[in-house]
Image (tube, rainbow, N blue to C red):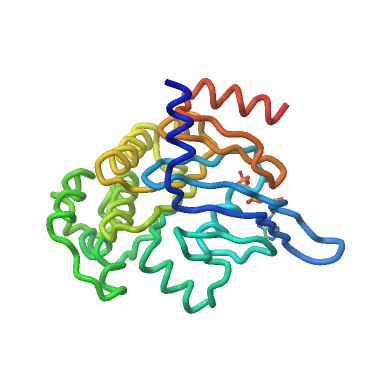
């Protein structure tokens, strides 16, 4: 079983991969080497969590993978596209058309209703929504009776579900999530993680999520561990216990 799982892994298609990615912030004496040569791949149709001690470079890595931050050296590919070779303009287009984001702060527009927020990226990209997909996603995130509400009329959990629905309806190549449960109570957090899991299993979505929380990471197919700006370890089919044990070893 273990062996066939690894063999499948060797054959799997990668949605995002990096080669020798470094990121240095600042200059001269104030340099911070946030990433020190990261080579890692993320499977298509898989849910991967990125974990590591505080300051290890998780958010920097996520931002470089998503083209939100420029690398200092090395390369990042999204499918066949080397995003580190794109101009700013090309990158903006690529992000708009192929990438979904879910942040800790939900980043919804306050004057728009839930429905308008969900459809906004498609509208900006000049694409028609697929009404059946929109209906399925809205049904799945249990927002059908909240579509006319503005963010201030929704709970934190509902707002985050609007953000997830917004990311999903444009069918992005990959969704990047940075501590998506960070501002949610534990019930809403679990609810959201279950929904992320469903979107991978039912919609074939690829998700890459940074988290501090072993419980959150246990919803992923695989956990990638970062320490001191390097990819140091990975776990397949993680449980909260195996993640916690690994974190203790990395921090010890
Ligand atoms: N804009 C910036 N300018 C200078 N240094 C930065 C900047 N952003 C991050 N760093 C530094 O880079 C290193 C990695 O930071 P990063 O935020 O990626 O870590 P992290 O693992 O996500 O941390 P945490 O878990 O605490 O959020 C840290 O030493 C941080 O102080």
Q: Position of residue 223 (x, y in %)?
A: 52, 35
Identified at 23% across, 65% down, the residue is 116
Instruction: Using the image as rendered, state which of residue 20 and residue 102 is in the foreground.
Output: 20
Q: Is residue 93 left or right of residue 205?
A: right
Instruction: Using the image as rendered, state which of residue 28 and residue 47 is in the foreground.
Output: 47
Identified at 49% across, 40% down, the residue is 49
Q: Point out the image quarter for the C terminus.
A: top right
Identified at 24% across, 71% down, the residue is 127
Residue 198's quadrant in the figure?
top left
Residue 117 in the image: above or below residue 15: below
Q: Position of residue 207 (x, y in %)?
A: 41, 47
Q: Position of residue 195 (x, y in %)?
A: 30, 40
Tally of numbered tags:
0
Identified at 49% across, 38% down, the residue is 10
Q: Point out the image quarter for the N terminus.
A: top left
Residue 167 in the image: above or below residue 90: above
Residue 63 in the image: above or below residue 213: below
Q: Is residue 125 left or right of residue 94?
A: left
Residue 75's quadrant in the figure?
bottom right
Residue 123's quadrant in the figure?
bottom left
Q: Position of residue 167 (x, y in %)?
A: 33, 56
Q: Is residue 218 left or right of residue 156?
A: right
Instruction: Using the image as rendered, state which of residue 250 and residue 107 is in the foreground.
Output: 250
């Amino acid at each position: 079983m273990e062996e066939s799982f690894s063999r499948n892994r060797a054959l799997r298609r990668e949605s995002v991969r990096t080669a020798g990615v470094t990121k240095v912030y600042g200059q001269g004496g104030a340099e911070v080497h946030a990433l020190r040569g990261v080579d890692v791949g993320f499977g298509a149709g898989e849910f991967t969590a990125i974990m590591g001690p505080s300051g290890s470079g998780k958010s920097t890595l996520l931002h470089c993978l998503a083209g939100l931050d420029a690398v200092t050296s090395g390369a990042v590919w999204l499918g066949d596209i080397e995003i580190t070779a794109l101009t700013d303009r090309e990158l903006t287009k690529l992000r708009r058309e192929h990438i979904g984001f879910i942040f800790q702060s939900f980043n919804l527009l306050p004057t728009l209703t839930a429905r308008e927020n969900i459809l906004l990226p498609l509208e900006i990209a000049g694409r028609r929504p697929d009404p059946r997909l929109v209906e399925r996603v809205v049904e799945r995130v249990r927002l059908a009776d909240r579509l006319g509400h503005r963010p201030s009329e929704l709970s934190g959990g509902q707002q985050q579900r609007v953000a997830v629905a917004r990311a999903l309806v444009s069918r992005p190549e990959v969704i990047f999530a940075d501590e998506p449960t960070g501002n949610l109570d534990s019930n809403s957090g679990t609810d959201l993680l279950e929904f992320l899991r469903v979107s991978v299993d039912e919609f074939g979505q690829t998700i890459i999520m940074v988290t501090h929380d072993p419980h959150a990471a246990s919803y992923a197919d695989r956990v990638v561990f970062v320490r001191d700006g390097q990819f140091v370890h990975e776990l397949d089919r993680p449980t909260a216990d195996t993640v916690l044990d690994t974190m203790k070893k990395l921090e010890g």
